[in-house]
Each structure stands twice: as C-alpha cells, then as structure tokens.
C-alpha cells in the first residue's frame, strides 16, 4: 500500500535547525507513495425540514473544517485551493521537530437531487528531516499524531467515513390532557423515556401554591421510539387528571449519508408516540 523513498538534504543550516538541541539525533526525510484511491460523498440539495438549499459552495466551505476535525490539526495548516488541498502537519517541542506535508485532489459536482464531493487520497506523503532527543528513556521519532510512523501515515492518508456540513436542531411543542395523575405519569415516563444513563436522568418536583411537576431529560437523550432526542415535559393538575406541555428537540446533521436524516414523517411519528405514552 505504501512505498517509501528516502532522500538526503544537503543543507547544513537546515540540519542544525532540525537537530532540535545538543545531543539530538537526526532522522532522514522520507517520501511515501500512496496507492490511488478516491471516495464519493453525497449530500442532499435541500433540507426537507426547513427547506434550506445546500450548495456546492457550502460543501467547499466546510471541507477544510471537516478535514481539520478529522485529522485533529489547526485549520490554518490546511489550504483549500480550486481542486487541491495542501496539508501541513508540524510538531515542534523542546525535544524534537518534524514536518509532514501532503496534497489531496478533490472535485465537487451536482445532479438534480445531490451534490457529490469526490476526495482522493494523497499521491505522496512527505516526512521532513526530524530529530529526537537522545537522552530520553525511550527514543521515538518525532511524529505528528503518533510516535509510530506507520500510524501517522495512515491517519494522514485515510479517507473520512463521513463528512458533515451542517449540525441542526428542530423543535416541536404542544399541549395534551391526560386522565392520569402526575404521580402515575412520572412513573410511566421513567419507564418509557428512560435515558441512556442514570447520570442523564433528572426529574424535578417543585411545590408552591399550585403543584408544578417538571420532567426533564436534559443531559442525555430519551429513547422512547428508538431514536435519541431531547424531551421536555411540564405537568399541572387539571380536573381529575393532568395538563401536559411537551417539547421534543430533534438534533440532526446534513452529511454525506445521501439522504435526509430527519423528515416530517419521523417528527410526526415521534410526536404521536409521545402523546400515546401520556394519554393512553
């Protein structure tokens, strides 16, 4: 998968600069040739929830940010040009200094329903002449990301599994009346809306002139219909039952799934399931 070519930098001043400090040991520059591979990332062109139109420019603008996140480096180290992405990784400490550079090709196209980002692996990955400090108990090459050169190379050349261009939220709310008492509803909600972990569950009981009962899942997501989402419920005594104000907060992404991750039918189904828990 990787082929390596070593070369020697003749500049003595560069050698002194990269040797790090007295007692350091230099590492020779290396160029790895990567097997050609590309991947298509497909995005919807319109969000069915708020009707936002997604453009080629949106995908282009988010590419730098997403690569920065996936690689764990500062965005300033990534330059996105017309069809090229220049990536530079630098690690510099009192113990060592090294630099890794790579160039990726990409293109963005569209059809009636989708925007397609095609991202290529870099043809080469270049490790600069680096150094490590000889007096360390365990001598390791000075590598961005990893001390292991093979792992560093893999991280730099891999294609992301998924690319996200927008993180979004959509809330719905309503009011229903239940025949059940607040104590009964709380017991039902704890059973039906149990969150991912105990630490994520928070139920508040507030007593004043009028009893007000709040049910909150505000640290983790509820899973009442197999999907994770936030649920907020306020309950008040009403005749022989309870008046309930509810809110469901759907968090979703516009990403390279090639389909909407949240639709109006999903929202309606979730609302109906919650109402059924509260009133049946």
Image (cartoon, rainbow, N blue to C red):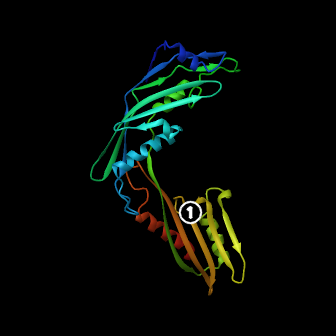
Q: How many marks?
A: 1
Task: Report x, y in % for residue 17.
Answer: 57, 20
Please report the residue visible at 61 percent of the width from the left and 83 percent of the height from the top. Answer: 241
Q: Furthest residue to the front?
A: 13
Badge 1 element: strand
Q: Which residue is mark 1?
A: 230
Task: Report x, y in % for residue 72.
Answer: 54, 38
Please report the residue visible at 58 percent of the width from the left and 24 percent of the height from the top. Answer: 97
Q: Is residue 210 above or below residue 151?
A: below
Q: Furthest residue to the left?
A: 112
Q: Quadrant of the C terminus?
A: bottom right
Please report the residue visible at 57 percent of the width from the left and 66 percent of the height from the top. Answer: 231
In front: 140, or 39?
Answer: 140
In front: 169, or 131?
Answer: 131
Q: Can residue 194 be seen from the camera position used here?
A: no
Task: Report x, y in % for residue 272.
Answer: 48, 71
Task: Report x, y in % for residue 265.
Answer: 41, 65
Please report the residue visible at 30 percent of the width from the left and 53 percent of the height from the top. Answer: 113
Label 1 crowd (10 A; few <14 / some 14-19 / many >=20)? many
Q: Quadrant of the N terminus?
A: top left
Direction from residue 27 to residue 42 in the image, left or right:
left
- Give the quarter of the image for residue 262: bottom left
Direction from residue 153 to residue 94 in the image, left or right:
right
Q: Is residue 12 above or below residue 35?
A: above
In front: 100, or 267?
Answer: 100
Direction from residue 127 to residue 217 in the image, left or right:
right
């Amino acid at each position: 998968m990787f082929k390596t070519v070593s070369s020697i930098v003749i500049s003595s001043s560069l050698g002194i600069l990269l040797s790090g400090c007295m007692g350091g040991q230099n590492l020779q520059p290396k160029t790895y040739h990567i097997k050609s591979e590309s991947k298509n990332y497909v995005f919807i062109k319109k969000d069915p929830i708020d009707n936002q139109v997604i453009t080629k420019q949106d995908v282009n603008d988010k590419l730098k940010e997403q690569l920065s996140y996936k690689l764990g480096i500062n965005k300033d180290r990534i330059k996105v040009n017309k069809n090229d992405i220049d990536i530079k990784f630098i690690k510099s400490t009192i113990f060592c200094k090294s630099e890794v550079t790579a160039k990726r090709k990409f293109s963005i196209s569209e059809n009636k329903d989708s925007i397609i980002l095609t991202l290529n692996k870099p043809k080469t990955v270049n490790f600069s002449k680096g150094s490590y400090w000889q007096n360390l108990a365990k001598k390791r090459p000075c590598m961005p990301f990893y001390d292991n050169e093979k792992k560093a190379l893999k991280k730099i050349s891999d294609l992301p599994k998924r690319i996200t261009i927008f993180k979004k939220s959509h809330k719905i709310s309503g009011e229903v009346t239940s025949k059940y008492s607040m104590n009964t509803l709380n017991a039902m909600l704890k059973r039906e809306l149990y969150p991912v972990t105990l630490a994520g569950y928070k139920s508040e009981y507030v007593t004043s002139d009028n009893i007000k009962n709040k049910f909150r899942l505000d640290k983790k997501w509820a899973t009442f219909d197999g999907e994770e989402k936030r649920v907020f419920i306020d309950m008040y005594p009403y005749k022989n039952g309870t008046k309930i104000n509810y809110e469901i907060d759907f968090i979703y992404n516009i990403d390279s799934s090639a389909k909407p991750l949240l639709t109006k039918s999903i929202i309606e189904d979730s609302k109906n399931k919650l109402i059924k828990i509260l009133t049946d």
